Each structure stands twice: as C-alpha cells, then as structure tokens.
C-alpha cells in the first residue's frame, strides 16, 4: 500500500509535468497549425539555463525562475514564431514538419556548444527546496517537489481554462479554431494570438522541463531531456491536439503507468526499465492508430507544393557514370581518412535514397530511417557474416536477408499506419524510431526466446565486417568506397527507372491526388505497403553499409535525432531528387566534417586567433539545423536551385569549359602533389561557387546590354492578366485619356470595365 | 432501362433532410443536367451516386444493378467515372502521363481479357479531346480550361459508361466552356456515354443537356428539357426567390 | 492608413462612393475567377450583387473585405486604395462583413460571439445591450453555444454584430441561404434600416427578388464579370435570363 501511494504520487507529479508540456503543444498547434517538435528542446534549453543561473552562478531560486520562466522562455517562443514559424503559413506539410525539427536540432547543437557535455563535473539539478525537503503523511514520505509539480499542473489546467473562458484573448484563441477568417472579419488579429500562444507554449515547455528534470534523477543530458518531453506528444495526441481535459487524462495515465512499471515489475525482468522508457512511444503509436482519423485535425494530405522534374533514364545513367569517375578522381588524391569520410557520406546518401523514394516519390513520410538501418545491422550481425577476426566478411546473403527483414518490419509498421497522413504518419514513425532506440537497442542481456538463446544488441556494440560478394572482396577502403558509390548509383538509377514506370506514375498519382486516384479505382493499400517495404529495405542496406564502414557501431549511430537530421537535410537538398540524397549524405557527413577539420587546422596554424576559429567550429555544429530552418523560403530544395543555376550556365559553352578546365587543372595539381588536399578542397569550392556566380553575372550583363525583350502585346491578357501598367501603356498607345475612375454616376450608367 | 436511376433517395443529416425522395435518371448517349440554387442538395446527390454519401432510404440503380451498398471503387470498376470541381490533377506528371496513369490504374483492376493497350488508348483519348498540342507539357503549366479537359480525358481512360462532372465550367472562359460543351455532346452522341452534369453555368447546361433536373431544398421541383425548365415558374421562383418574400 | 486619419476625412468624402472597385481581377490559385470587376457603392446606399451561384459574387465580397488579395486592379475604400490591407485592419476601421453561411463561431456561446465583436472598440456591455434589445431571443440564449442555435437565430447573431459595431460599410454575403422566407424578409428589413442610418451596404444575394425591394442599385454578375448594372426596376426583366439562360 505504501509503495502504491508513494509511486502514485510520483506518477501524478510526472504526469502533471507531461501535461504542462502537452498543453503548450495544444495551445500553439491550435492557434498556428504548427506542431512544435521543438517543445522538448525548449524545455531542455530552459533546464540548462536555469541550472546556469541557479547553480552555475548561484542566483537565488526565485530570481532564476523569474528570469527563465518569466522572461527568457516567453521571449524565445515569441521570437520563434515571429522569425521562423510565421513564414510557414501556406507551405507544404513536409516543410511544416521539417522546420520545427530543424529548430529542435539547432537548440540541441546550441546546448552542446554552450554546456559542454564532456565537462568533468556532472551537472546536478536539484528538486525545489533541495533534495531532502520531504513532507510526511503518516508513513509516506513525499518530496515537496513532487507536490509542487502536481499542484502546478492542476493550477495550469485551471488557469488555461480560465484564460479560455474569462479573457477576450482566450476566447479569441478558441474562435481561431472555429473560423480564423471570421475572427479577422471581426477585427481580431490571428497573428498576434499565435504570437502570444507561442510565448505561452514556450513558457509551459520550460516549466515542464524544470519540474521534470530532478524527478528523473539522472545527470542533465541535452539529448535525453529533449526526448523526454517528446513523451508528452502522446498526451497531446490523446487530447487530439484540442481537448485539454483529455490531454490531462492522457498525461496522468502515462505518468502513472510508467512509474507503476518501475514499482511492480519483478526486478529480474531486466527489460522493465527500457519498457518503461518506451511506454509513452507505444502509447503514442496506439493513440495515433486507434483515434478515428476524421476526428484528428490537420490530417491533411502530405502534398508537396513543389514540383520535381525527373531526369530521363539516359541522364540518370550519365550522372551515375560521372559520379563513379568523380569518386575515382577523388580517390586518387585523397588521404585514407578522407576516403573513409567520403565512403561514410555515401552510405548516408544511400539511406537518404530511401527517404527520396518514400517522401519524394510517394508522398509518405518516415522520420526513423536509421531505425530500419539498425534492424538490418542486427540481422547482419547475427546471421549475415562469415569467418572471424580479420577474415570476417559480411555475406551477400546476409545483406539480402537484412533487406528482406527490414522490408517486413517496414510492412508491419506501415500496415496499421496506412491510413495516417502528414503529421500523424510522421509522429507514428517517430514513435517507432524512439521505441527501437529505447527498447531494442538497449537489449544487451541474453534472452531465451522460444528456446533460442539470443542477445539482440550484444554488449552495446555490434561489429560488422566489410562485405565479400562472390569473388569480390570489398575489405580494402578503396574497394569499399567503390562499392558504396556503385550501390548508390545503381539504386539511384533503379529509382529513376521506377519513376518512369507505370508503378512510379501510380505512386505520383497517389501522392498528388489520393481522391482522384481512388475514383479511378486504385487500391492504395498494396501500393503504400510496397513502397514502405522498398524504402525500408533501402534504408536497411544503407544502414549495413554504414555500419560496415564504421566497423563497430553502438546504439548512438541509430539515434532518432540523427534520423531527423538526415530527413531534414534531404529535404533541404531536394526530397524529390536522387541528387538530393547525395547532397544530404555529403553535406551531413563530409562537408560538415571537412569544415570542422579545416577550421581546427587553421586554429592550430594561426594560434594567435585560435579562439575565432574555434568559435566557428561550434558554429558548424549548428549549421545543418540553421539551414533546415530556412527551408520555409526555398521549398524545392537547394539542389534544384543549383541545378537551375547550372542550366543557365550550360547555355554558355565558354563558361562550362572554364569550369571543367579549371577543375581538371586543380585536380592535376593535387594529383601530382604540387598542392595539398586542403588547397584542393578550397580551390574546388572557389571554382564551383565563384565561377558560376561571376560567370552568371557576366552573362547577365551581356544579356542586359541588348534591349530587354518585351512581352508580345498580343499575349498580354492571355499569358498573364492585364496590369495597370499594361492598360496605361495601351491608353498611351491609343492616345486615350487613361483609365476612367468610376463613380456613383458611372455605376448607374452601367459602366462595366475600362471605359474607352 | 436507364443507365442510372436514383429511386426515392433520401438523406438526412441529423434532423435536416438534405435530400427528400429524389428520383432522377440518366440515359446512355445523352447529357443530363443537375441544377438548383446553392444548398439545394446537388453535391449530396452527386455523392450518393459516387458512393461517398450513404443513403437514409431509397436506392441507386446503375446498369440495372442495385449499387446502393457498393463502395466507391466498386462503382468505378462497374464503369462510373467522375471529375472534381476543385482540380485534382497529378501535378508531378505531364499531361500525357496524367491520362496514361489512369489507364494503367484501370489495367490493374480490370479482368485480364479486358485489359487495354494503354499507350494506344492514351493517344486515342488525347486526340479525341484535343489535347495533342499540350500532351507533353507539365500539367501545372496549362490553363484551367485545358486542365478540366485533362480531368475529362483521365476519366475517359477507365472506359466508363457513366460520366459524372462536378462543375466543369468553373474557372473556364466562355469560349472554353463552349468548346467543352461541344466535346460533351460529341462524347454522348458518338460513344454512347451517359453524362451527368452538376453545373452553375446555365449557358452550358441549357446548351448541352437533353434533360435537366432541378433541385431545391433537397426536393426535385422540376424536370424536363431546357426550354421547359427555363420557363417553369417554380424554377424561376426557386432561383430568384418567391415574389411574396420581398421585405 | 491610420484610424484617426480615416475618421477625420470622413465628412469630406461624403459625396464620393465609399467602396470602389476598379477593374479588379482575382484568382484562387491559378484559377482566375474575377475578370475585371468595376463597381462602386455610394455612401448610404444598398447595392446588390445578383447572379447564379459560382458567378463570383462572394469572391467580390472577399476582395473588398480584404480576405482575398486582388491580382490586378484597385479596391478603394473612401477614396483610398486598400489593396493588400489585412482583413482585420479593415474590420477595425469600420468595415463589417457577414460572411456566407452564418457568421458565427459555433463552439463559442452567444455572449462570447458578441465579445468577439468588441475587437473594433465597442465595449461588450454596449454590444450586448444593442443585440438583446433588437433580438430578445438571443438574450434568452446568451449562454448557449452558437452552433446549437437555429439557422435564423445564428443569422440574427451575426446581424447583431453588424448593428452594434457602428460600421461605415456593411458587406453581406448570401444572407438568406437556407432560411425561411419570413425570416429573410425580417433580416432585410433590418438591413434597410441600417442603410438609412448612412451605412453603405454591398450585398450578394442569389435570390434576387428578396433583395431588390431594398436595393438602390443592382449588378448582375456572370462568369466573373459584371454584365449589367442598374436600378432594380431596370434589371427585373433580365433576371430570369441571367439565371436560367436565354
């Protein structure tokens, strides 16, 4: 009985904290239509900031609280809305998902930059009134902190209720849900309401973070804290992103069940801790699937506003060949470490191909690509290798088996999630990803499953040897580099073939208009299922290659945050393009690492201004997220911009020759060791960026020298509507007096257009 | 026997009667119009025919078979095609591929013996509706009028016997509407298609429809040729408001 | 355009039309639905937009109210070009719009609905007083959710907002939709009174005869263009042809 009460109170306190975070999600989603994936990251930043004030600088608690909750958190929320989220109105569903994820990853990087996680003293975060402030109710000992957490949660619930009923702004927030246009017609300012709610949502996130951190009792970790508040997603979903009482109920259920698991599961069940951690994700997955879809708001079709041009099959083959040649040329001049980096980048590019297939081609979404990679790696580790020690090799059959298993897992996930779309599908896959991280990848004990003794994730790390396929041994770094490049090219070309097939067209049809596809008699179930399986298999193969390149992988390699980064960068690169996947791999792995190394080298070389370079090293860690956040403005991705730019340059032979010639010369210098690899990289970048830009300017200037080509007058009004300038021009040409301004009299005379 | 018949179709939303015993018919080889003021129940009736809206009572008979309980895709496979008021084109495909993919989808569900040569059929339909000039352009680049024709061509690819068109004239210029009307007449006359048209644009309806059904407040108030319906005082009152109600 | 500025000049432009559209074009996405609309509403008069559904009447009102930006042409309010002004700003400047299909928030109570009307500056007490005096039924149901009211009561609620915020311009979209003729007649009686107080009213109405009795001018909208403008008497004979073809 005593245990029960003890754990009930802890469960209520944790559930209350979840509710506080979830209510923030509901409020922001309601007024702005954007699901704030960064809610957890905001909580995390608040916890670190509070720690800094309270224990780093020894401020008194009230002052630190006032500063964090009263000033910084609301400001951060308001700024987020004003600078980033406001621009997302009218963008595609994918962008609305990716940009908040970018913010989340950015905050994550920022926290690691400011609060170095490898610092020697662990940061301890204490409960309110210290760790020893207890109240005794009979035989039960309850910490003040837990009481405070629960009381605040109830107060927040009552407070939000009062806000929504007793204040005009609160009523207006409910009005926005009913009809934002009507509110505008009443003179209300939906934008301002959204701003206020983001400030409030951020405050709630911060409050939840500060309450929950000491209750979980471990040292502060940016990643863990961010994901902790993600548990609140399940509660928010239970409230259908709308109802606060249901959200509260959901949060309390999650809080209580997770603590009861700890209290009552036999201690010999070594998996109960992982199970407790994954419970909110299981809850989230079930809630998403069980809730009637029509009652879920925002379940719109994942429609990409952008249009992607598919290259012809011939172009795909040429591009594949070019890729192989470029990889070869690079290999000739690169050092061993650089070869390794490039190979790793290519393996990530292969994983990103699975996203291009799923999201770019079929309009579905998967936020947990690397979790499929993890499953494939487990399969290969257990069943797909031969030999031992340095003679160990991954077999072709092992890779194929892994692909089949991941495809099946993909099907198992996709089957219940088939009717989910957009945000809800994204959340369901994310729940799966977090589940894999918390439940499967923590399985380090031997289990007896149906008489089969088995350890899933042996000793927390798995060693995957390089593959040997038939007579070809890919153990040497160079051979493996070519294998990965070849694999990328072949899968990429295969995808282009697919896209040009009837199957690919049906995918496009399903993506562009599910309604029209259905009325043409298409059954989407098999199509969706097959594309999910294919995508999962590609992610699996990529994951195995990634693990083989690294050699020994631990569970961090398959972290959900890494999956999210990859998805984000692929969207930036252009989710509809094969090249977008290549961009994602190269950027996420090679480019960031290269910048990092270059800056560190400079810091050593020019030690007098070392601090500046080290500062930029930190900036680089935040860079990918920053680029993701800017997505709202460039919906088709960066690669398409570059391609569009190159298209113009292609018109000019001299420019192309200059570009290729210069690059060849730089390469020759590097190959003959006249210049170092550093210089090669820098000169290449200068060449690739500067020549098109300068060349483009020159071309443009030359074009501008001629008379600007006017729109043929007969096409005005056909190709585009008349503008006032056109009319004025016409009036001038026809010697008329100009547009007649209508007045009350002309209305009566029946003037209907431009009077002549 | 008519191609399509709705027999005493009634639909209630809560206490509101959206359709009250509506019986209409669509004949093969002719164009039938469905008109009425806003809120009259046209869309609801349209949805009962396609299968999106369940009936409270009554039945839908298509090709002599009672399809009241059949789901939408079954009706499609029996030869019922439709277009959308809000364009629902496959924007990442070219005009030709928009049409072609419809045939490919059809081949997936049709019986082996009735499979079509998709490429040949695509070319035939594209020429038939007059899209040959724009066939290789991106579907997002062509004007609305032509986009409506693409939707029509796509619907034709499943080789329907009944074609339901939801406000095809909206967004079309007068000239485009005229051409579209001619095309519909040709399809009905030459291919024996039954076409049912929900449309606000009376110039189109009056010109192409052999029979017109008029709905008002969920009830069918008139039914007949264009000339009959146009001069029916009940219809005029429904559209203009009854003279007594002037404030 | 600041609020004070607007009111200062109010008297000076009394003779000029309060709403003017000059060759306005508008589109939903790539579909152009208004192909050059020119129209004006003189101060204190009722102008009716007539025509079959889908002709573009509601779109014209959307453009005037600021909910839809025109792709070309000018919208002028009291002589000033207001293209691009957000709807809420126009609303606070005295432009009251009752949109199609009951301008109420269904999940808000009657009182809360009226509370939303106070955004343009009138205190809630005044709004409630005016509303309940005019429509005692609303007073009885002030705590009821607007979505549970009958169609006529909902329309009263939206009209109550129009009455209480003292607008200079009133835009009414399909006031009669789905309502019994007697209720409609009642509502239009109120519209006529409002216009006598000097409010300029632009009303779109599918059921032409219900509005011709109170309108000074009417325009027939077909295919996104205005085909005919005149007094109700001048248009009476053309209506049937406009709606049902000729």
Image (tube, rainbow, N blue to C red):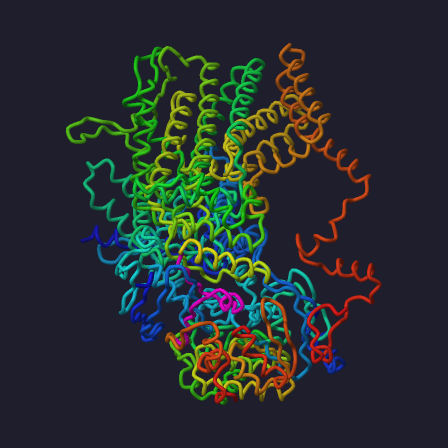
Q: Going by the image, does A362 lie left or right of A751? A: left
Give the residues in magenta.
B193-217
Q: Nearer the viewer, residue B174 or A67?
A: B174
Question: Where is residue A662 shown, x and y percent of the image?
Answer: 69, 20
Find residue A663 and report its image quarter: top right
In the displayed orientation, state which residue is furthest to the right: A735
**Residue sitting at 41 percent across and 27 percent down?**
A542
Q: Nearer the viewer, residue A628 or C152?
A: C152
**Residue sitting at 38 percent across and 41 percent down?**
B116
Eyeballing the image, is A313 above or below C239? above
Whether residue B197 is in magenta: the answer is yes
In the displayed orientation, state which residue is furthest to the left: A451
Find residue A268 and report its image quarter: top left
Q: Going by the image, does A509 lie left or right of A184? A: left
Eyeballing the image, is A747 above or below B175? below
Q: Is residue A13 visible?
A: no
Q: Quadrant of the C terminus of chain A?
A: bottom right
Question: Where is residue A715 shown, x and y percent of the image?
Answer: 70, 52
**Residue sitting at 50 percent across and 85 percent down?**
C187
Whether residue A44 is in magenta: the answer is no
Q: Is residue B220 visible?
A: yes
Question: Where is residue C88 shown, x and y percent of the image?
Answer: 59, 68
In the displayed orientation, state which residue is furthest to the front: B190
Question: Where is residue A525 shown, x and y percent of the image?
Answer: 33, 44
Q: Nearer the viewer, residue A327 or B129?
A: B129
């Amino acid at each position: 009985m005593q245990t029960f009460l003890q754990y009930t109170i802890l469960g209520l306190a944790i559930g209350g904290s979840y509710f506080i975070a979830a209510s923030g999600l509901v409020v922001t989603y309601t007024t702005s239509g954007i699901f704030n994936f960064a809610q957890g990251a905001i909580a995390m930043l608040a916890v670190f900031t509070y720690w800094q004030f309270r224990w780093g600088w020894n401020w008194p608690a009230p002052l630190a609280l006032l500063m964090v909750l009263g000033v910084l958190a609301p400001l951060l929320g308001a700024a987020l809305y004003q600078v980033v989220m406001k621009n997302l109105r009218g963008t595609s569903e994918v962008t609305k998902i990716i940009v908040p994820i970018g913010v989340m990853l950015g905050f994550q990087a920022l926290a690691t930059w400011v609060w170095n996680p490898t610092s020697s003293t662990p940061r301890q975060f204490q409960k309110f009134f210290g760790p020893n402030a207890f109240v005794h109710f009979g035989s039960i000992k309850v910490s003040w902190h837990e009481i405070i957490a629960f009381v605040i949660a109830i107060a927040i619930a009552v407070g939000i209720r009062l806000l929504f009923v007793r204040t005009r702004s609160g009523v207006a927030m409910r009005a926005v849900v009913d009809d934002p246009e009507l509110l505008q017609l009443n003179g209300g300012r939906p934008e301002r309401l959204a701003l206020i709610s983001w400030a409030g949502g951020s405050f709630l996130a911060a409050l939840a973070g500060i309450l929950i951190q000491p209750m979980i009792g471990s040292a502060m970790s940016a990643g863990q804290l961010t994901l902790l508040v993600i548990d609140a997603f399940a509660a928010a979903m239970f409230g259908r992103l709308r109802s606060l009482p249901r959200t509260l109920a959901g949060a309390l259920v999650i809080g209580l069940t997770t603590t009861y698991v700890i209290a009552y599961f036999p201690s010999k069940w070594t998996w109960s801790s992982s199970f407790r951690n994954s419970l909110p994700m299981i809850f989230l997955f079930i809630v998403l699937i069980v809730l009637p879809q029509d009652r879920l708001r925002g379940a719109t079709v994942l429609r990409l506003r952008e249009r992607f041009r598919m290259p012809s099959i011939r172009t795909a083959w040429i591009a594949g060949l070019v890729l192989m040649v470029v990889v070869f040329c690079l290999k000739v001049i690169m050092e061993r470490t650089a070869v390794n980096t490039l190979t790793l980048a290519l393996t990530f590019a292969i994983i990103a191909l699975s996203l291009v297939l799923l999201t770019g081609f079929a309009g579905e979404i998967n936020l947990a690509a690397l979790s499929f990679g993890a499953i494939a790696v487990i399969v290969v580790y257990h069943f797909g290798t031969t030999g031992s020690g340095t003679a160990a090799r991954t077999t072709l059959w092992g890779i194929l088996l892994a692909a089949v298993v991941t495809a099946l897992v993909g099907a198992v996930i996709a089957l219940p999630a088939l009717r989910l779309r957009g945000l809800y599908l994204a959340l369901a896959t994310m729940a799966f990803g977090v589940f894999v991280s918390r439940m499967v990848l923590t399985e380090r004990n031997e289990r007896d499953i149906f008489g089969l003794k088995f350890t899933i994730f042996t000793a927390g790390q798995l060693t995957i040897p390089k593959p040997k396929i038939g007579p070809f041994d890919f153990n040497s770094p160079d051979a493996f580099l070519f294998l990965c490049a070849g694999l990328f090219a072949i899968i990429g070309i295969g995808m282009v073939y697919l896209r040009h097939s009837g199957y690919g067209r049906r995918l496009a049809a399903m993506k562009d208009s599910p309604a029209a596809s259905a009325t043409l008699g298409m059954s989407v179930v098999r199509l969706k299922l097959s594309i999910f399986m294919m995508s999962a298999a590609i992610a699996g193969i990529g994951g195995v290659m990634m693990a083989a390149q690294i050699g020994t992988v631990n569970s961090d390699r398959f972290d959900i945050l890494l999956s999210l980064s990859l998805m984000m960068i692929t969207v930036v690169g252009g989710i509809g393009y094969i090249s977008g996947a290549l961009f994602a791999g190269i950027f996420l792995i090679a480019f960031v690492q290269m910048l990092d190394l270059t800056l560190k080298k400079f810091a050593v070389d020019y030690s007098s201004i070392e601090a500046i370079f080290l500062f930029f090293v930190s900036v680089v860690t935040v860079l990918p997220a920053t680029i993701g956040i800017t997505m709202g403005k460039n919906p088709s991705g960066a690669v398409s911009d570059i391609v569009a730019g190159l298209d113009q340059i292609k018109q000019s032979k001299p420019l192309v020759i200059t570009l290729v010639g210069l690059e060849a010369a730089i390469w020759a210098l590097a190959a003959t060791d006249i210049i170092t690899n550093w210089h090669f990289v820098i000169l290449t970048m200068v060449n690739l960026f500067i020549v098109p830009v300068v060349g483009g300017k020159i071309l443009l200037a030359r074009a501008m020298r001629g008379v600007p080509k006017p729109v043929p007058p007969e096409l005005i009004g056909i190709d585009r509507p008349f503008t006032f300038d056109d009319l004025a021009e016409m009036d001038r040409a026809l010697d008329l007096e100009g547009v007649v301004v209508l007045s009350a009299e002309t209305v009566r005379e029946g003037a209907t257009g431009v009077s002549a | 026997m008519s191609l399509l018949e709705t027999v005493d179709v009634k639909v209630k939303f809560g206490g509101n009667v959206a359709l009250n015993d509506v019986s209409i018919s669509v004949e093969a080889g002719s164009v039938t119009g469905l008109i009425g003021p806003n809120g009259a129940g046209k869309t609801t009736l349209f949805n009962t025919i396609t299968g999106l809206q369940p009936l409270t009572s009554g039945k839908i008979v298509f090709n002599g078979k009672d399809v009241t309980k059949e789901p939408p895709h079954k009706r499609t496979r029996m030869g019922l095609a439709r277009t959308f008021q809000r364009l629902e084109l496959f924007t990442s495909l070219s005009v030709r591929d928009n049409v072609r993919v419809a045939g490919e989808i059809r081949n997936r569900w049709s019986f082996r013996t009735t499979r079509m040569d998709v490429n040949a059929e695509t070319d035939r339909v594209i020429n038939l509706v007059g899209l040959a000039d724009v066939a290789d352009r991106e579907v997002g680049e062509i004007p609305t009028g032509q986009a409506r024709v693409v939707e029509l061509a796509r619907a034709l690819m499943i080789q329907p016997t009944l074609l339901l068109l939801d406000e095809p004239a909206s967004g079309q210029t007068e000239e485009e509407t005229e051409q579209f009307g001619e095309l519909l007449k040709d399809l009905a006359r030459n291919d024996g298609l039954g076409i049912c048209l929900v449309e606000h644009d009376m110039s189109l309806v009056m010109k192409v429809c052999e029979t017109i059904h008029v709905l008002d407040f969920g009830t069918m108030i008139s039914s007949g040729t264009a000339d009959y319906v146009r001069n029916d005082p009940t219809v005029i009152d429904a559209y203009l408001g009854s003279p007594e109600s002037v404030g | 355009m600041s609020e004070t500025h607007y009111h200062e000049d109010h008297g000076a432009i009394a003779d000029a039309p309060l709403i003017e559209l000059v060759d306005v074009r508008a589109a939903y996405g790539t579909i152009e639905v208004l192909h050059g609309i020119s129209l004006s509403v003189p101060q204190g008069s009722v102008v009716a937009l007539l025509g079959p559904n889908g002709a573009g009447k509601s779109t014209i009102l959307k453009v005037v109210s600021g909910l839809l930006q025109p792709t070309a042409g000018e919208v002028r309010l009291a002589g000033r070009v207001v293209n691009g002004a957000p709807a809420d700003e126009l609303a606070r400047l005295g432009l009251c719009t009752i949109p199609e299909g009951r301008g109420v928030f269904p999940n808000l109570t009657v009182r809360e609905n009226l509370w939303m009307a106070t955004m343009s500056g009138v205190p809630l007490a005044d709004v409630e007083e005016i509303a309940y005096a005019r429509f005692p039924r609303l007073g009885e149901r002030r705590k009821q959710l607007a979505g549970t009211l009958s169609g006529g009561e909902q329309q009263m609620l939206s009209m109550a907002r129009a009455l209480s915020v003292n607008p200079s311009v009133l835009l009414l979209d399909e006031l009669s939709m789905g309502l019994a003729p007697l209720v409609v007649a009642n509502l239009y009686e109120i519209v006529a009174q409002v216009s006598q107080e000097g409010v300029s009213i632009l009303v779109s109405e599918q059921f032409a005869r219900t509005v011709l009795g109170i309108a000074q001018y009417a325009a027939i909208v077909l295919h996104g263009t205005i085909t005919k403008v005149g007094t109700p008497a001048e248009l009476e004979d053309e209506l049937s042809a406009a709606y049902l073809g000729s």
